Image (cartoon, grey):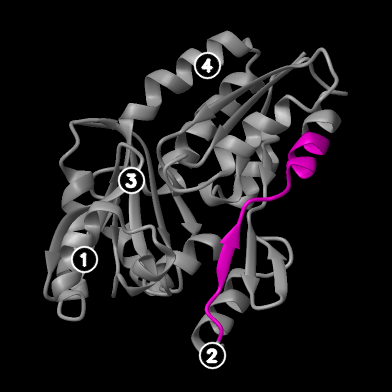
Amino acid sequence: MTVKIITDSVADIPAEVVAELGITVIPVLVRFGEETYRDGIDITTDQFYEKLVNSKVMPTTSVPSLDMFARTYAKLGEETDEILVIMLSSKLSGLHNAALQSAELVESDCRIEVIDSGCAVMAQGLVVIKAARAARDGASLDEILEIVRRNLPRAEIRAAFDTLEYLKRGGRIGKAAALMGSMLKVNPVITLRDGVVEPAGRTRSRAKAIDLLYDFAAGYSHIEELAVEGANCPEDVDHLVERLSAIFPKERIYRSRTTPVIGTHTGPGLILVAVLGDK
């Protein structure tokens, strides 16, 4: 039987890739006051950013119920006897813990392995895609686990913001708090290291911040996979993809939009590059 791959909506994998590889995506919950939405299902990215800009209520995010995870496992368990779950960094969310706890609730002989990716967005997504391809090609669960563990350290991001205010409000700022003193005067660039947000640079303009994203990708000696994603800045994404096509085939660059869950913590100006490769 083919191993089934599960991840969360924060991985930001393009919908067409999810469908092609048969990846199951657990939607994180987004709340505006009393209104609750399943990330990417009940609210579109455009609708979310319109609400984010115009609503007087700041959105929050939450982990789906254990029952939702358990029902997903049980359903997939009817099709396979091996499931691999790759979740957002446990230092950023309770998703990994919920995935683990839910696996204990399933009365099935299906083997379920849960991995803490230690990353997020398309850095996580690129590894999930690699795992799903291996599963499609007939790899066993143990073989895919080895692939994932070998490649997670090779996945990294750089992300540029207009402000760190949203990260600050959401409590996800980590060591990037060092940038807060000049938050209103700079365009910060961050990364994820050991599962938490850390500063990776600061510039006086958005254009220079995007230059740092390009330089980050260009600094790799070998790029296996590359992705560019943005929140509500399609023109910036287009421009960066064009620039990156000088160092990596344009047709192989994944383009993605950050889901509402990410937008809750970053605001509308986020743009990032994710690389799977070797420096």
Which residue is tagged 1?
A: 188
Considering the numbered disc 4 on the image, is that residue within a helix, a strand or a loop? helix
Q: Earlier in the sequence, mark 3 or mark 2?
A: 2
Please give the residue where the numbered disc 3 appears in the rendered image. Answer: 196
Nearer the observer: mark 3 or 4; the answer is: 3
What range of the chain is rendered magenta? 57-72
Q: Quadrant of the N terminus?
A: top right
The residue beneath circle 2 is 54
Disc 4 residue type (three-letter): Leu
**Helix, strand or loop status at disc 3:** strand
Q: Nearer the viewer, residue 268 or 245?
A: 268
- At 33% across and 46% down in the image, what residue appears? 196
The quarter holding residue 68 reads top right
Disc 3 vs disc 1: which is toward the camera?
A: 3
Residue annotated with mark 4: 145
N-term-proximal mark, 1 vs 2:
2
Q: Does residue 155 belong to the magenta stretch?
A: no
